Image (cartoon, grey):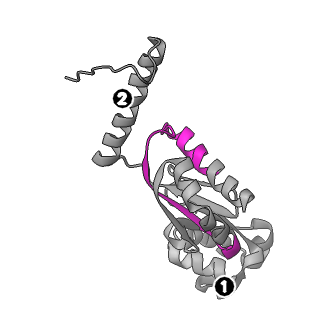
Amino acid sequence: VVESVQTVIVLARAVRDRESRPNKMPLQTLAVVSQNEVFLRDVDRLRDYILAELNVKELVLTTDEVSYVGVVVEPDGRKLGKKLGRNFQALLAACESLAPEVAMEFFQSGRFRFEPAGVDITADEVTFVRRAKNEKSCNTDGAVLISLDLELTPALREEYYSREFISRVQALRKSSGLKLYHNIDIEYT
């Protein structure tokens, strides 16, 4: 359980660091995508801890990779060059323009019919590269993908500024040597 939660937190913090979103800045949604149901249950057991640790309002746990991950198909020239001959270049072009749904179907089924050559292409003749649809807000360790909603809504921005204001007031109290029982007046204009 702890390892699962640690994985999610490390991946999410890396996105926050990369996109200059400090942990004190609240974010709306964190999605955790994994095919491992046990992993998702482990994460769900410590949902409240993750939400608090990452300062996120919602946690979405899903096995639905299609919403977050795209698959790119890269043919293996050594294996398919001899098999297809001149048609290999056409296969390269076809793979580059392959619709995401078709690439994901090929990834899941392991077979693809390449009509121009009348040949079935199998999973061991290509490399599947999984890429996050929004690389800016995603991070993965291979088995788990996390996606952070980096948009700051007016409500999230207001919460961030409120926390920042309180933090600065407390820092000023401390540097002035004031104790909790000292009353202060604050004027904001």
- Residue 72 visible? The answer is no
Which SS class for mark 2?
helix
Horizontal side of 18 relative to 85 (left or right) equals left
- From the top left corner, tell me how far across and down residue 1 is, in percent: 72, 63
Q: 155 or 126, which is in the foreground?
A: 155
Residue 15 lies within the magenta run = yes
Amino acid type of disc 2?
Phe
How many C-alpha atoms fall within 10 Å of the one at disc 1: few (<14), some, or many (≥20)? few
- From the top left corner, tell me how far across and down residue 27 is, in percent: 43, 49
Which numbered disc, 2 or 1, marks the residue that appears first in the sequence?
1
- Mark nearest the camera among 2 and 1 is 2
Q: Which residue is mark 2?
A: 165
- In the image, residue 53 sits, relative to residue 161, either above or below, namely below
Q: 47 or 98, which is in the foreground?
A: 47
Q: Residue at x 59, y 70 (%)?
A: 95
Horizontal side of 122 relative to 67 (left or right) equals right
- Quadrant location, the C terminus: top left
How many C-alpha atoms fall within 10 Å of the one at disc 2: few (<14), some, or many (≥20)? few
Residue range (magenta): 11-38
Q: Residue at x 70, y 64 (%)?
A: 143
- From the top left corner, tell me how far across and down residue 53 is, in percent: 56, 48
Residue 143 lies within the magenta run = no
- From the top left corner, tell me how far across and down residue 14 is, in percent: 60, 44
Q: Which residue is mark 1?
A: 109
